[in-house]
Amino acid sequence: MTGLFFWRVHIHLIVLGATVVCVSCGLLADGEVSVKRGWNWYDDPAGKTLPEPEDDLAHEPVIPPMERLRKMRPAAVGDLMAAQLSYAIVSEDVGEVAQYYQLLDFVRRRSRAFTALSGVALLQHPQLNARSSYPITNAGRTADSKARKQDRSRRLIAERGEFALVMFSKKSCAYCDVQWGVLQSFRDRTGWTIRRLDIEAYPDRAARMNVQGTPMTILIRRDSEDYFPVAVGAESLPVVADNAYRAIRVLKGEIGLKQFLTDESDDGGFFDPAGTVAGIAHHGD
């Protein structure tokens, strides 16, 4: 029995070895076996070559005359500076280091000149200047914010007869009551009609308005199929009010979707994505 067991094991090992050989071999068209060899056998596979080492040596760049340097693109000057810096570090030569700082001085002066010209251009062409539509001082920003809030509030009160808010909720919603309280505050300030609908009781309406979760607040237009989402989840009163104001402008065709963040005071101005700036006449120095 011991001899029979030994021969069975020996036969299994032979079969396993033949299987391994077949896996690592390929059959030619005429039935001959071709063994595939590669890097594991320290052979260079046909058609394969080792990548050439990159040239990582620093080379001395050619610094053009100042007259030509002034006409070069900023990106090209930047490449020249990088090359000179590399060579100065490798060469450890004072003259090469000084050459790098001479290039740096050139760039510094050009940057200073461009900054000065930018200031003049924005003063002479205020339509290109953001400060024409947005103040940068604290007092100016406070006054601007107050004026915008008053304009939005007046618009919301004026539109209370044409629009309303609907909030979709469900019994298991943990913070639907929180959002409902925000809408009640909105109603108290604007006089709007607000309504709360259970998404499980009105699945068709929820599906038509693409309500995927609760709470979700939708602005609707009376006697119309128009609607616009203004809040997903529990949002603050300012966010609800701002989005309701913007949604009204969209539904009334005053602005497009890309102008959703544009207030009436911004129409056609610096921050209006749909606005354009008239051509600038070039007068030279």
Image (spheres, grey):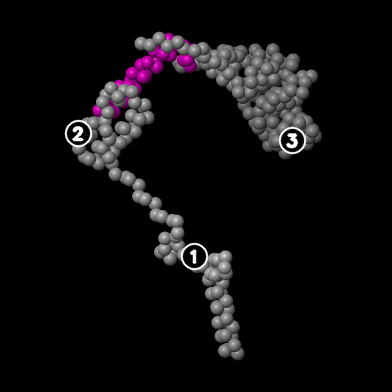
Q: Does residue 140 show up? A: no
Q: Which amino acid does label 2 sit on?
A: Gly
Residue lying farthest front? 30
Q: Residue 102 carries which label?
A: none
- Name the residue tied to disc 2: 95
Residue 116 colored magenta? yes
Q: Does residue 37 show up? A: yes
Query: Crowding near pointer 3: few (<14 within 10 Å), some, many (20+)?
Result: some
In this rendering, the label closer to the viewer, 1 or 2: 1
Residue 204 colored magenta? no
Quick one: SS at disc 1?
loop
- Name the residue tied to disc 3: 170
- Name the residue tied to disc 1: 36
| Percent coordinates x, y for residue 8 in the rendering | 59, 83
What is the span of residues highlighted in magenta in the rendered image?
Answer: 102-131
Label 3 to label 1, Cα distance in Å? 66 Å
Label 1 to label 2, Cα distance in Å? 58 Å
User: Which of 281/143 is in front?
Assistant: 281
Quick one: SS at disc 3?
loop
Q: What residue type is labelled 1?
A: Lys
| Percent coordinates x, y for residue 225 in the rendering | 77, 23
User: Which of 219/11 is in front?
Assistant: 11
Please indicate whether residue 171 sits to the left or right of residue 31 in the image: right
User: Which of 97/224 is in front?
Assistant: 97
| Percent coordinates x, y for residue 260 in the rendering | 61, 22
Query: Crowding near pointer 2: few (<14 within 10 Å), some, many (20+)?
Result: few
| Percent coordinates x, y for residue 126 in the rendering | 46, 11
